[in-house]
C-alpha cells in the first residue's frame, strides 16, 4: 500500500494513466474496498457492541435530534419510511429505543432513545472508532492528507 501512495504521489497524471490506471477500474477497486471496509466495520461493531452500523446510525440521529416522528427519522436518514420500520422495530425489541403514539394522529409514531440505547450507542461508536483508527492509522500524515484530498476531489468530480 505504501508503495502505491509513493508511486502515485511522485508520478504526473499522464504517467499514472500510462501505467494502466484506468479510471473505471480504479473506481471499481475503490467501491470494492469501501464495501469491504463497511462490512468489516459492521462486523466489528456487532461483535463489540451488539449493534450494526445501520442501527448505530438510527441511534445517532435520535441522540442528535431527540424525539422524532418515525417519518422524520426516515427523512433524517435519507431513507423511505418503510425501510426504517424494520430497524426501528428491532431497536425497540432490544429496548434501545421506545415508540409512542402521537396524541394528535394515531397513525404516527414518535421515536426516542432510551438509556440502554445511549449506552449501546456509546459502545458502538467506540468500536467503530477503534477499527477506523486501526485501518486508517496505518497511513502516515501525508498519506492521510493525500487520501482526504483525493476523496474530496472524487466527491466533487461530477459537479465540474
Image (tube, rainbow, N blue to C red):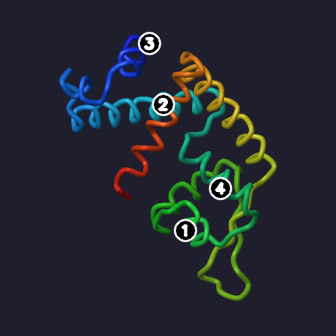
Specify the quadrant that holds the C terminus. Answer: bottom left
Q: Residue at x 58, y 27 (%)?
A: 132
**Residue 50 point in image, percent of width and height:** 62, 35
Residue designated by label 3: 2
Viewer-side label of 4, 3: 3
Q: Is residue 89 above or below residue 123?
A: below
Closest to the observer: 126 or 82? 126
Q: Nearer the viewer, mark 4 or mark 2?
A: 2
Instruction: Please tell me which of labels 4 and 3 falls first in the chain.
Output: 3
- Badge 1 element: helix
Residue 18 relative to residue 63: left or right: left
Residue 133: quadrant of the picture: top right
- Could you tell me residue 103's position as x and y percent? 73, 84
Indicate the secondary structure of the residue bearing disc 4. helix
How far separated are the C-alphas under marks 3 and 1? 40 Å
Q: Quadrant of residue 15?
A: top left
View extreme (right): residue:
115
**Which residue appears farthest toward the top when viewing the image?**
3
- The alpha-carbon separation of the residues under discs 3 and 2 comes to 12 Å
* Quadrant of the snapshot with the N terminus: top left
- Please identify the residue farthest to the bottom as the structure is shown: 104
Crowding near the residue tagged with mark 1, few <14, some 14–19, many ≥20 C-alpha atoms within 10 Å: few
Q: Which residue is mark 2?
A: 147
**Label 1: which residue?**
75
Please report whichever mark, 3 or 2, sits nearer to the chain's N-terminal start: 3
Front position among marks 3 and 1:
3
Amino acid at each position: 500500500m505504501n508503495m502505491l501512495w509513493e508511486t502515485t504521489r511522485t508520478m504526473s497524471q499522464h504517467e499514472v494513466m500510462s501505467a494502466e490506471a484506468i479510471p473505471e477500474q480504479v473506481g471499481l477497486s475503490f467501491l470494492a474496498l469501501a464495501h469491504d471496509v463497511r462490512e468489516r466495520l459492521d462486523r466489528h461493531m456487532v461483535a463489540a457492541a451488539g449493534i450494526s452500523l445501520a442501527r448505530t446510525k438510527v441511534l445517532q440521529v435520535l441522540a442528535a435530534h431527540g424525539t422524532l416522528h418515525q417519518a422524520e427519522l426516515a427523512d433524517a436518514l435519507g431513507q423511505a419510511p418503510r425501510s426504517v420500520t424494520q430497524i426501528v422495530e428491532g431497536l425497540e425489541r432490544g429496548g434501545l429505543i421506545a415508540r409512542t403514539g402521537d396524541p394528535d394522529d394515531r397513525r404516527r409514531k414518535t421515536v426516542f432513545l432510551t438509556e440502554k440505547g445511549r449506552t449501546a450507542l456509546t459502545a458502538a461508536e467506540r468500536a467503530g472508532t477503534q477499527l477506523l483508527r486501526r485501518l486508517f492509522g496505518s497511513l502516515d500524515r501525508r498519506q492521510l492528507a493525500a487520501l482526504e484530498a483525493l476523496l474530496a476531489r472524487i466527491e466533487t468530480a461530477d459537479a465540474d
